[in-house]
Image (cartoon, rainbow, N blue to C red):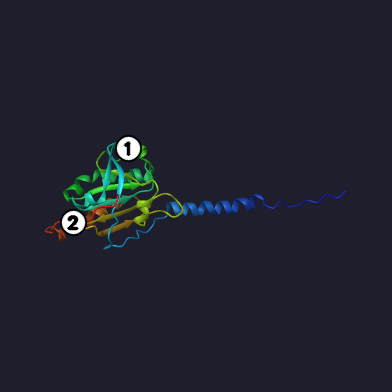
Amino acid sequence: MRYFYRRPRWSLPGLCLPLLGIMAFAGFVCFSPARAALPVGSQAPLFNAQATRNGSEFSFHLADALRQGPVVLYFYPAAFTRGCTIEAHDFADAMDQYKALGASVIGVSTDDMPTLDRFSVSEGHGRFPVAADPQGQIARMYDSRLPLLNRASRTSYVIAPDGKVIYAYSALSPSGHVSKTLDALRQWHAAHDHASPVSLPTAVK
């Protein structure tokens, strides 16, 4: 009797190659730097978000923060990951410099509030607030959301009190975000020492 071998429709190599391709694409999306798409001079979208500082939760309103001075708004992918922890330490260490320039800092990620409560204490050292963007809506408004993933790219914006973006920087490495935003603030501060206060529209709740 003759036996015939029928080749299976899906072989192991046939399954592995598409899977490897998907994994490679996901790795590229997760770890390649994304470009900050909001151009300098554009109006920064106002938003409200649940935030926490040193474990104490509150409602953050960008419009209110801008009435006090420039705001550094930075997006990061996920709390307690290596790069985001380094970045939080850098911002915490530089808070005295930001305050001397009349600026405040707010970090935004898609993490939930219990995670951010812990992160603000252990990694932010209670020096600045971090806000929750669980659906990535704020990151999308700022063109700082990674494609296909509910994660923000590592992107930093400097927003002037009139609501205009005066600096935008996007890079995978956490190093540079603090120094570059401080430089942007110094340049803005030098040119606007005698700027008059501006009135901002109230953010939609």
Q: Secondary structure at mark 1?
A: helix
Count all numbered tags in the image, as a single digit.
2
Q: Secondary structure at mark 2?
A: loop
Q: Earlier in the sequence, mark 2 or mark 1?
A: 1
In the picture as drawn, the residue positioned furthest to the front comes out as 205
- Left or right, 161 with reference to 30: left
* Mark pair 2, 1: CA separation: 32 Å
Q: Amino acid at mark 1?
A: Asp
The residue pinned by badge 1 equals 117
- Left or right, 148 with reference to 59: right
Residue found 71% across the figure and 51% down from its top:
8
Residue 158, image x, y percentages: 26, 55
Which labelled disc corresponds to residue 79?
Answer: none
In the picture as drawn, the residue positioned furthest to the right comes out as 1
Give above or below for 164 relative to 137. Answer: below
Residue found 33% across the figure and 47% down from its top:
108
Q: Amino acid at mark 2?
A: Ser
Report crowding for label 2: few under 14, some 14 to 19, many 20 or more residues within 10 A (C-alpha): few
**Relative to the observer, which residue lies in front, 105 or 176?**
105
Residue 85, image x, y percentages: 34, 43
Give above or below for 116 relative to 19. Answer: above
Report crowding for label 1: few under 14, some 14 to 19, many 20 or more residues within 10 A (C-alpha): many
**Relative to the observer, which residue lies in front, 11 or 159?**
159
Residue 164, image x, y percentages: 24, 59
The residue pinned by badge 2 equals 199
